[in-house]
Amino acid sequence: MSLPVDLQLSRLQPLLRTKFIGREMLVVLEAADSTNAYLLESASRGAPHGAVVAADYQTAGRGRQTRSWFSPPGAALLCSILLRPPVAPEQIAGLVLAAGLAVFQVVRSAVGDIVRLKWPNDVLINGRKAAGILCQAVLGDQPAAVVGVGLNVNLSPGEFPIELRDTSTSLSQAAGRTFDRGSLLAELLFQLEMQYENWLNDRAAVYRAWEQGAAIHGSPVRIVEAGETYDAVAERLDDEGRLIVLVEGRTRVVACGDVHLQGV
């Protein structure tokens, strides 16, 4: 088998509008266990800042907390980007929010104002998950991360596993038409490069923009964190991108865990 037309390099490269992302290294695979795993290995061998790996489908795609990611051939946008920011290692985690904002912009351009961000790494369409972002640190002397994106593009409702049909959606399902994944990938890389540079220069501004995309303030949420489940009201992000919530009138910081939107 060969790559589908929409992901062939001869079509992709002329679509790029980036300055550095995808310029030195742009690899598109027919299949990968995981584009993140592929690029993490490449990073350990010196892959350049801005390297990109994409695949038509994955056989062992991952989400947060070792969850699997459903991605059949021809239906999803699956890519990973290597970033080597000049920041302290503890700041790397905030990249997931900048990447989420980039995905949010792409999805909103495709389907309109029915899109919402969910902390820390999901993009929802009409309350259903359409995309997820997985940010993994690269081991080594210099801070680096592989940012993986999985976006459901041309999946019909019946193609999702039964257990995902009530909670997941795709661009085609929301818009009533199919999409060219190559064009989406080029736009995603452009948006990611812009948000990455914004994040380097003014993280607070990126986090405020993320808050607007999430419509976060005053939202009732259920938090599952370290074996504890509790209801809260989301307030804002702090300067490190952590979620600030109110629990019975008291402020609490959520650094990890799952956040479930109530009434969505």
Image (spheres, rainbow, N blue to C red):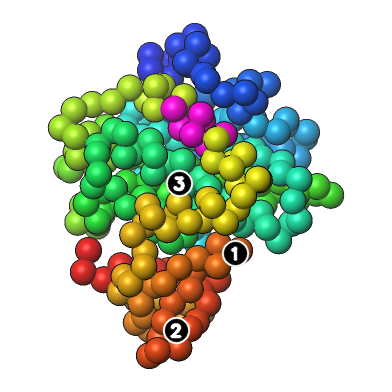
Residue 242 is situated, as x and y percent measured from the top left of the image, at 54, 67
Name the foreground residue: 69 vs 140. 140
Q: CA distance from mark 3 to mark 1?
A: 16 Å
Q: CA distance from mark 2 to mark 1?
A: 24 Å
Name the foreground residue: 49 vs 75. 49
190 in magenta? yes
Tag on residue 239?
A: 1
- Disc 2 marks which residue? 228
Name above or below for residue 26 compared with residue 162: above
125 in magenta? no
Write the start and end of the magenta stretch as one range.
187-193
The residue under the point 31% across, 39% down is: 108
Residue 136 visible in the shown view: no
Secondary structure found at label 1: loop
Residue 233 is situated, as x and y percent measured from the top left of the image, at 35, 77
Residue 176 is situated, as x and y percent measured from the top left of the image, at 15, 32
Contact check, label 3 and label 1, Cβ < 8 Å: no
Please rate how many residues cluster around mark 3, counting C-alpha atoms within 10 Å: few if below 14, some from 14 to 19, many from 20.
many
- Disc 3 marks which residue? 101
Q: CA distance from mark 2 to mark 3?
A: 28 Å
